Image (cartoon, helix red, strand yellow):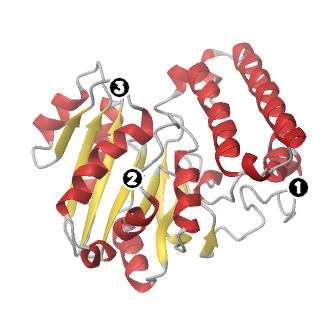
């Protein structure tokens, strides 16, 4: 991989952002890293802190909080404009990286080498571990079809984690240490070949915080590219560290994203009654999540 452009979108996460950039600086790579930080209208001085501490990083100030998709697109547009030749875009990639995702020194090197060795790969993601050592289940997923979403929302996927039918969404029946072709990896660490972006387009800004990575992977696969989970590369994901204070807003965004994904990719080919049932189920499950979150102590509130 000739060059990897890294995009980190931040919103009031100054501490996490500096730690993330510090870990990124320690990466051992044999190719240049071109790092962009997009500030989504933070009020905690994040952008100024980055500019002082990491003057080699390209910073972009968003006019308002554009969400994950909108913030990344600001940097993606600049990156693509700098690499106009299609042949060069096959040999270059962009890494979407969350500020709460901390890399091993060889993580980028390994995922970049994977793309070099697999020309059919449009997207690759590593094994993401949570702070307690558990696998972040979102790092390898199937697309949320009505059936897989039903099994997940009703708890059947959690009750039968090794069942290929019920546990398809998070693929918990697969060995977490084996490389696998999957439908999607997670936007916390999502390395994408520029040529695949040429084919599929930018992130869909209809999604504010969730679902944009699934939607992007869906469109990239539709163009003939493959998506891989590659566990030889690893990273630590402080999942939820940047969103706990906004848990109610993000619960709404989580379930809104589920509805948007279904409406965009499945509804046009689905019987109208089933579409109505899916939409009703998403609304009811979202309302339940809001009620349950209201009852939790502040320290235990979560997004979904």
Which of the image's four quarters has the N terminus?
A: bottom left
Which residue is pictured at 62% across the width and 74% down the height?
A: 180
Within-10-Å neighbours for mark 2: few <14, some 14–19, many 20+: many
Q: Earlier in the sequence, mark 1 or mark 3?
A: 3
Work out whether 161 lies above or below 281.
below
Work out whether 49 lies above or below 168.
above
Viewer-side label of 2, 1: 2
Where is residue 203? Give x, y as percent: 44, 48
Task: Please report contact status of discs 3 and 2: CB closer than 8 Å, yes or no.
Answer: no
Within-10-Å neighbours for mark 1: few <14, some 14–19, many 20+: some
Residue 117, by quadrant, is: bottom left
Is 120 situated left or right of 5 in this image? right
Q: Earlier in the sequence, mark 2 or mark 1?
A: 2
- Residue highlighted by disc 2: 96
Seen as rendered, the residue at the extreme bottom is 117
Whether residue 304 is visible here, answered yes or no, is no
- Residue highlighted by disc 3: 12
- Residue highlighted by disc 1: 160
Residue 245's mark?
none
């Amino acid at each position: 991989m000739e060059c990897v452009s890294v995009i980190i979108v931040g919103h009031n996460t100054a501490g996490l952002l500096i730690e993330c950039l510090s870990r990124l600086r320690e990466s051992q790579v044999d190719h240049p890293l071109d790092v962009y930080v997009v500030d989504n209208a933070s009020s905690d001085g994040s952008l100024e802190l980055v500019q002082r501490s990491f003057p080699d990083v390209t910073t972009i100030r968003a006019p308002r909080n554009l969400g994950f998709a909108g913030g990344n697109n600001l940097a993606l547009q600049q990156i693509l404009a700098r690499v106009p030749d299609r042949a060069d875009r096959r040999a270059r990639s962009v890494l979407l990286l969350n500020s709460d995702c901390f890399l091993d020194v060889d993580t980028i090197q390994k995922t970049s080498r994977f793309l070099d060795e697999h020309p059919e790969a449009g997207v690759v993601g590593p094994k993401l571990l949570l702070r307690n050592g558990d696998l972040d289940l979102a790092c390898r997923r199937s697309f949320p079809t009505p059936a897989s979403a039903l099994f997940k929302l009703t708890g059947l996927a959690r009750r039968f984690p090794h069942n290929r039918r019920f546990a398809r969404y998070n693929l918990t029946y697969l060995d977490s240490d084996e490389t696998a072709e999957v439908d999607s990896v997670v936007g916390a660490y999502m390395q994408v070949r520029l040529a695949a972006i040429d084919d599929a387009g930018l992130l869909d800004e209809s999604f504010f915080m969730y679902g944009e990575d699934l939607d992007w992977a869906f469109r990239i696969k539709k163009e003939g590219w493959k998506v891989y989970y590659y566990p030889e590369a690893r990273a630590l994901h402080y999942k939820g560290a940047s969103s706990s204070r906004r848990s109610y807003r993000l619960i709404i965004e989580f379930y809104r994203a589920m509805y948007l994904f279904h409406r965009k990719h499945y509804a046009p080919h689905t019987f109208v009654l089933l579409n109505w049932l899916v939409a009703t189920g998403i609304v009811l499950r979202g309302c339940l999540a809001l009620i349950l979150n209201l009852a939790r102590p502040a320290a235990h509130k979560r997004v979904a």
